[in-house]
Image (cartoon, rainbow, N blue to C red):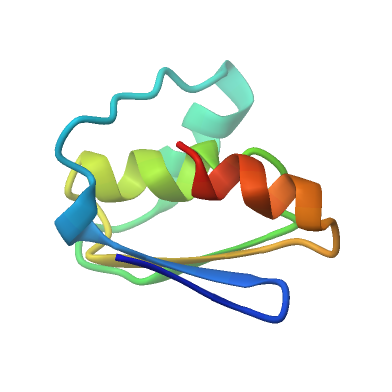
Amino acid sequence: QIKETQGLLGIDSNIMNDIWIMLSERLQAIADLIEYGETMADIGTDHGFLPVYLIKTGKCPYAIATDISQNSLKKAENL
């Protein structure tokens, strides 16, 4: 489930069944730093690839994506 509240997206692992994302080298390096089971926050998420990837791979049960741009949040929401 994706919940939006004033520039914030909460992304729940229950909706990630059919999504697969290939990360850039830079985002993969960040993803590799996250421990399994952690909740993460992506401040300035832009496209939302990192939080969705971390949920899809099972590393994070929940992620928060934030951005001041509503267009960026829409991109993340539509993944």
Quarter holding the N terminus is bottom left
**Which residue is pictured at 22% across the width and 65% down the height?**
61
Image position, residue 13 (x, y; %): 21, 58
Image position, residue 66 (x, y; %): 67, 66
**Which residue is pictured at 28% across the width and 50% down the height?**
55
Left or right of residue 75, residue 79 in this image: left
**30 vs 14, nearest the viewer:** 14
Quarter residue 69 falls in: bottom right
**70 vs 68, nearest the viewer:** 70
**69 vs 51, nearest the viewer:** 69
Q: Is residue 65 above or below residue 39?
A: above
- Direction bottom: furthest residue: 5
Quarter holding the C terminus is top left
**Which residue is pictured at 36% across the width and 71% down the height?**
39
Left or right of residue 70, residue 53 in this image: left
| Tally of marks | 0
Image position, residue 48 (x, y; %): 57, 44
**Which residue is pictured at 30% across the width and 58% down the height?**
35
Left or right of residue 1, residue 51 in this image: right
Q: Is residue 64 above or below residue 5?
A: above
Quarter residue 7 falls in: bottom right
- Direction right: furthest residue: 68
